[in-house]
Amino acid sequence: MGLASDSAGFPFSAKLSAANSPRFCNPMSRRIFSDVAGDITVSVDGQSFLLHKFPLVSRCGRIRRMVAEAKDPDLSKLELVNVPGGATAFELAAKFCYGSNFEITTANVAHLRCIAEYLEMTEDYQEENLIVRTEMYLNDLVVKNLEKSLQVLCACESLDPMVEEIGFVDRCVDAIAMNASKEQLVSGLAHLECDAGSGKLRMHCQDWWVEDLSALRIDYYQRVIAAMRRSGVRPESIGTSIVHYAQTALKGIERRHVWDSGPLVGDNQRVVVETLINLMATEKITAVTLSFLFGMLRMAIEVDAGLDYRIEVEKRIGLHLEMASLDDLLIPSMQTSESMFDVDTVHRILVNFLQRIEEDDSGDLSPCGYESDGLKSPSHGSVLKVGRLMDGYLAEIAPDPYLKLQKFMTLIELLPDYARIVDDGLYRAIDIYLKAHPSLMESECKKLCKLIDCQKLSQDASSHAAQNDRLPMQMVVRVLYFEQLRLKSSFSGGHSGGGGEYCSFSQRITMPISGSGVPSSCVSPRAAGAADSYASLRRENRELKLEVSRMRVRLTELEREQGMMKQGMRDGRPGEHGRAFFASISRGIGRMAMFGPAGERRKKSSRATASSQCSEGKSRRRKKPSVTYA
């Protein structure tokens, strides 16, 4: 019942004197004029208003019809149900009927518009009725101002469904989107700066309405964002608004632990999470950070959002997985019977990433990845980054005693071979898993260790693996074998200049012979060099095949002796077989030393002897080299 304000309000002209202004007493006895007794009582939401029929029926079509249709000509009581805005809105409408001054503001204009529609206060009953007055305020002051439109829309939340039926919400939503677009354009032009380096214009402006949108109800907010998208508001501003809304609306959610039982959040938070995810998908909003997407994924898990919404966030994360950090992937599991970390979610994210890489490559990358031009593409660099990231993730989840072997192996096998240049990180993760799961069967350990490419292990990792008691014997032998090959290769490369015997032997073998048995002198040096190289490659190939055969035979012997030692231990006689087994290992290591420099020198001398024997004549049949095993 306050007086009108000239600056901030939208006043009505006073039609009553001060003495006849409305006065409202206690809820059960309300009177308009102190000198005239009321003749009708209107009940609204349990509150009674003692009023007069004439001012009400002169402006309100609903009350006029109710009085006219009443069977009692002396009707003294009316009850209004489902009144939008309740008793507060009806009191303002009653003041308007009596001509009392009050102020229309952004806080009450929606209530006045709805109660006027409910009471049918149209121009058919009196000119400049309440509907026209509220529409004038809405058109002149609200829809032209972004801040006022937001305030009015916030006030509409308790007026459903009447506020929707009259289209009041849609008008406010469109006004917000239109004003935001205009304000962004004007503000952007005012903050344009020229980049001296590139000669391009850069825009530096802050959208103040981003924070104010967080006060809206989630369904209103969704409609505002969709309208802003249609009106041309920058995607960066919309993305910033979504992030701020999520931080504001979901800040009260506490992290749930696996040992907690029962839901800790209500349906409201679940609706907020699902709506924001759906909004990013339908409006194709990409201007959000990867950390925000991981935060939304964690929230979706916390509030038990639908699987479709979680998959949508996982797809968006998979597009930029190479930019993620290890902490982002360590998502706690909400299932009490599963592992400590949500491995299934990370698995789906990795699948989405690999699908994106496959689409980007368009078949240009070969299956091995090393002999293709795609190796130099940005997508291959992303695969390498994700490979290092996943090795770190595997090492973090490996100590979990509840982590199933199949899940662990599936995550390893998912990445292609070219995703790892060095397998040191993978070896470390598998070693941690073996240490944390000592109850694994020997067959399971072998199956897991086969995922390691021994040729990709560094020297330090190979040295550690050769002394690792947790690894199967086959794995240790493979590591030692490839380490010997590496040593042999490095030795041969470092002493290639002093191989006189190799050079003379190659020349005698590859030099063409004339019909008289005399070496031909018409062969060019280039042809001779090519023949030398070919003969050298064939010789090395034969040597490698021989060494592989020796290692296979030795591996079979070691496995047999290991089985005998286990049988002896079960029979209670470990001494004899144990000594035999360790003696065989010593002999095997001594035999492996033949692959080193000393063995190489013995091979060179044998080649020289064989060459001299070959030059004596073709009548003698060359003997096959005898192979002995220690």
Image (cartoon, rainbow, N blue to C red):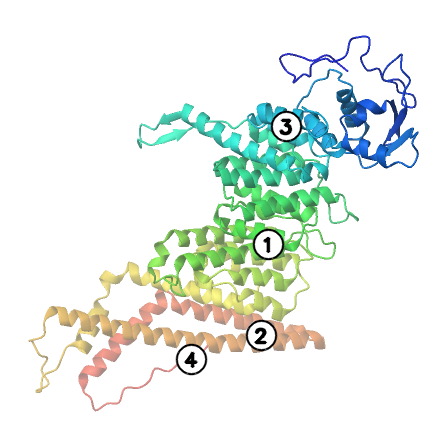
- The residue that mark 2 highlights is 580
Q: Residue furthest left?
A: 522
494, above or below 81, in the image: below
Q: Nearer the viewer, mark 1 or mark 4?
A: 1
- The residue that mark 3 highlights is 135
Q: Secondary structure at mark 3?
A: helix
> Residue 58, how many percent across, how many down?
78, 25
Q: Secondary structure at mark 2?
A: helix
530, above or below 7, in the image: below
Q: Earlier in the sequence, mark 2 or mark 1?
A: 1
Q: Nearer the viewer, mark 2 or mark 1?
A: 1
Q: Amino acid at mark 3?
A: Glu
Q: CA distance from mark 3 to mark 4?
A: 106 Å
Task: In this rendered view, identify the residue nearer to me: 98 or 225.
Answer: 98
Task: In this rendered view, identify the residue nearer to me: 348 or 234.
Answer: 234
Query: Which quarter of the figure is the N terminus placed in?
Result: top right
- Asked whether the residues under the numbered discs 4 and 2 touch, taking CB atoms below 8 Å apart as contact, a structural biologist would say no
Residue 132 in the figure: left or right of residue 499: right
- The residue that mark 1 highlights is 311
> Residue 400, how many percent across, how many down?
66, 54
- Residue 7 visible somewhere in the drawing: yes
Mark 1: few, some, or many residues within 10 Å (few <14, many ≥20)? some
Q: CA distance from mark 2 to mark 1?
A: 58 Å
- The residue that mark 4 highlights is 628
Mark 2: few, some, or many residues within 10 Å (few <14, many ≥20)? some
Q: Amino acid at mark 4?
A: Thr
Mark 3: few, some, or many residues within 10 Å (few <14, many ≥20)? some
Mark 4: few, some, or many residues within 10 Å (few <14, many ≥20)? few
